[in-house]
Amino acid sequence: MQKADTEIVMRSLASVGMEDYAERTMDRMSDGECQRIMIARALAQDTPIILLDEPTSFLDMPNRYELCTLLAQLAHDEGKCILFSTHELDIAMSLADAIALIDPPRLVCLPTEEMRRSGCIERLFRNKCVTFDTATGVVKVR
C-alpha cells in the first residue's frame, strides 16, 4: 500500500474506534468488532452512499444501539448517506433521520417523526396482541 492509502485506512479505522485493530484478523474479533471493521472498509472507499443489510444482526442490545449511534454520527460528521435495512423498529425510530417503510405494494419514505405520526407503522401492528402508539413511537403489548 502507498502512504496515502495507509493514511486513508487508518483514518477510517479511527472513525469507527478501531485503530488498534489494524493488524488483527477478523477471525480474532467479535461480531461487533467485525461490523465496525466492515464500516471502516466502506468509509475507506470514500463513497457518498453506504448501503448496509441488517448491520445489527448477531449483536446484543447495547452493541446494536452503539453501532447505530456510530452510523448516525458518521452520516452527520462525514456527510454520508447511510442506508440500512433493519427489523429493529425501536432503533430506527430513535436514531434514523428518515425511514423508508416497505408496505407492499407501496414504499413510503418520510422523516422519522412524520413516519411515526403517519399511521403507516401503526397499520402494520393491527392485531390483538400488539399496537404501535403514534404519539410516543412505542410498540405496546396488550
Image (cartoon, rainbow, N blue to C red):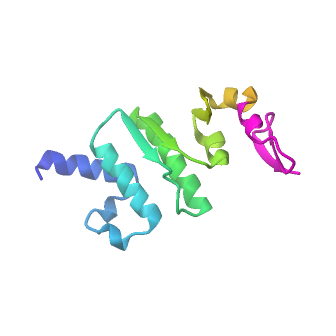
Q: Residue furthest bottom?
A: 28
Residue at the image point whose x is 33% and y is 64% from the top: 20
Q: Where does the magenta region start and end? A: 120-142
Q: Residue furthest front?
A: 105
As rendered, which of 133 and 122 lies closer to the eye?
A: 122
Whole-percent x, y for residue 25 in the image? 29, 69
> Does any portion of residue 17 appear in the rendered image?
no
Q: In this view, does 45 lie to the left or right of 130?
A: left
In the rendered image, residue 73 lying in the magenta stretch gets the answer no
Whole-percent x, y for residue 112 in the image? 64, 32
Position of residue 84 relative to residue 38, above or below, is: above
Q: In this view, does 116 lie to the left or right of 131?
A: left
Whole-percent x, y for residue 66 in the image? 54, 54
Q: In this view, does 30 lie to the left or right of 86?
A: left
Residue at the image point whose x is 41% and y is 56% from the top: 36
Q: Is residue 109 left or right of residue 13?
A: right
Position of residue 92 relative to residue 58, above or below, is: above
Whole-percent x, y for residue 89 in the image? 66, 45
Residue at the image point whose x is 37% and y is 59% from the top: 18
